[in-house]
Image (cartoon, grey):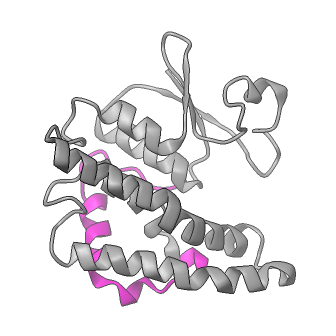
Amino acid sequence: MKVYGDLQSGNCLKVKLLLSFLNIEHEWIHVNILDGETKTDEFLTKNPNGKIPAVELDDGRYLCESNALLGYFSENTAFLPTDTYTKAKVYEWLFFEQYSHEPFIAVARFIQKYLGLPKERAAEYHALQAGGNKALQIMESQLSKTQFLVGNEMTIADISLYAYSHVADEGGFDLSRYPAIQHWCQRIQATPGYVGMA
């Protein structure tokens, strides 16, 4: 199995983390987004949307979209509950990550860390702060009650939201305001098989 990604990307880290926690053998193929490597004709045959991560399964089929990949690899493992309601709560957090968290925190991080906060994107960067802090506050509230986002066992909800939350400071978000998130990050980092960003 081949995984196409960049370990500076939170979306790619999600997949790498789950595969590592589950000890699933794979070949990691580095793809540089900033150099346009996701826009080549060859890459677009793997993912027509031109984004990473992308996975080539052993049978030659491709799967894309980080949270879909988490769902695929976590099936029949402890990272995805079997109870219908609890499983739906996991997916609730996955949708939250894509719509209410990542568009603020990951984009602010990209503007600050990769683009160096250029003047022409400063207004956009500052506008992202309120939405990102709202998402972090919702997580903080839940993590003040439970060890992980869906109860007291780690699920793919945690892996998905950890990816950009633990580097939210690189997008201007002050994690010292969120002690429950900080402790949650430490619990994830202490899990056997943990791998961090490159």
Would residue 156 be counted in the magenta stretch? no
Range drawn in magenta = 169-197
| Residue at (76% x, 86% y) in the render | 123
**Can residue 182 be seen at all in this image of the molecule?**
no
| Residue at (17% x, 67% y) in the render | 147
Q: Position of residue 3 (x, y in %)?
A: 54, 31
Left or right of 22? Residue 97 is right
On screen, residue 69 above or below 194: above
Q: Position of residue 30 (x, y in %)?
A: 64, 38
On screen, residue 34 above or below 79: below
- 6 or 53, which lies in front? 53
Q: Position of residue 53 (x, y in %)?
A: 58, 40
Give the image quarter of residue 185: bottom left
Would residue 175 be counted in the magenta stretch? yes
Give the image quarter of residue 137: bottom left
| Residue at (34% x, 84% y) in the render | 178
On screen, residue 10 above or below 166: above
Q: Position of residue 145 (x, y in %)?
A: 15, 75
- 86 or 115, which lies in front? 86
On screen, residue 105 above or below 44: below
| Residue at (15% x, 69% y) in the render | 146
Name of the residue lying farthest toward the top: 59
**Can residue 177 be seen at all in this image of the molecule?**
yes
Left or right of 100? Residue 88 is left
- 45 or 131, which lies in front? 131
